[in-house]
Amino acid sequence: MAQIFHRSTNTISRLSIFGGIFLVAGLIGLFAVLDRSSYNTGVGVVLAQPIPFSHDHHTAALGISCVYCHTSVEDSAFAGIPPTATCMNCHNLIWNQSPMLAAVRESYRTGEPIRWTRVHDLPDYVYFNHGIHVAKGIGCESCHGRVDLMPLIMKTESLQMEWCLDCHRQPESRVRPLSEIYTMGWRPEHADQGTRLIAEHDINSKVSCSTCHR
């Protein structure tokens, strides 16, 4: 019986199989790169806000503490967005005619809150509590970066699950004394300080799924 397929068909089939494997591997690799890119995570991307609020000016230059605006960060899941009245505590007296702050004055007059664009916005299926992290010695800088140097706020960490797990598995690299929670640029005094602080803060880092997905 005559051969139906040409001998080259074997070579083509092998190339097709190996090519398909490499194609799938390449697509998986491309997906992984895109998943970690700023296009997906938003790291380093400045989002448009109704008012160009500068953390740099208010914290580093004026020395205003994080908790003056984010009042619930120590005992709540949500750090809190300050009401317009908090802004007007100062801006009733300074820059009270600035066109840049017209939206602040209008919000204060009408009682309509300013619609800020969330920068650090976790998915709804993720449970996160600011209060417990602050109580266990995790500073603002660990998640939000050097906000005191940001004219406009942006993400410096992906906040993806693998990033959270890295911290939960090795909290000694990020834990700090409770007195330094709001200190930007803080660095440990010695190499084993993190290990000592874990015992001092009674940290029992959890990595089970139910910790964040409830």
Image (spheres, rainbow, N blue to C red):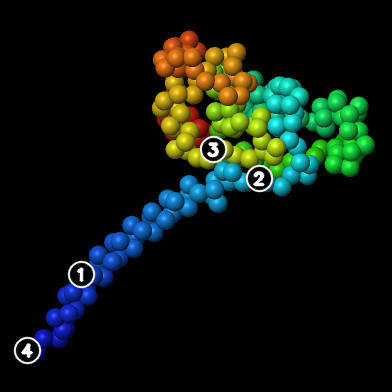
Mark 4, Cα crowd under 10 Å, few <14 / some 14-19 / many 20+, is few
Which badge, 1 or 4, comes first in the chain's sequence? 4
In x, y percent, where is residue 28?
38, 55
The residue lying at 93 percent from left, 37 percent from top is 97
Q: Tell me the distance, in whole angstroms, between the alpha carbons under discs 3 and 2.
A: 13 Å
Q: Tell me the distance, in whole angstroms, between the alpha carbons under discs 3 and 1.
A: 43 Å
Which badge, 1 or 2, comes first in the chain's sequence? 1
Checking the image for residue 51, the label placed there is none
Single out the mark in the foreground, 3 or 4. Answer: 3
Please tell me which residue lies in front, 59 or 43.
59
Mark 3, Cα crowd under 10 Å, few <14 / some 14-19 / many 20+, is some
Q: Mark 1 touching mark 4, by CB under 8 A?
A: no
Q: Mark 1 touching mark 2, by CB under 8 A?
A: no
Which badge, 3 or 2, comes first in the chain's sequence? 2
Q: Amino acid at mark 3?
A: Glu
**Is the residue 176 above or below the residue 98 in the image?**
above
Q: Is residue 201 visible?
A: yes
User: Left or right: where does residue 94 sit relative to residue 200?
Assistant: right
Single out the mark in the foreground, 3 or 1. Answer: 3
Q: At numbered mark 2, what does the secondary structure look like: helix, strand or loop?
A: loop
Checking the image for residue 46, the label placed there is 2
Single out the mark in the foreground, 4 or 2. Answer: 2
Q: Which residue is mark 4?
A: 1
Checking the image for residue 157, the label placed there is 3
Q: Tell me the distance, in whole angstroms, between the alpha carbons under discs 3 and 4.
A: 67 Å
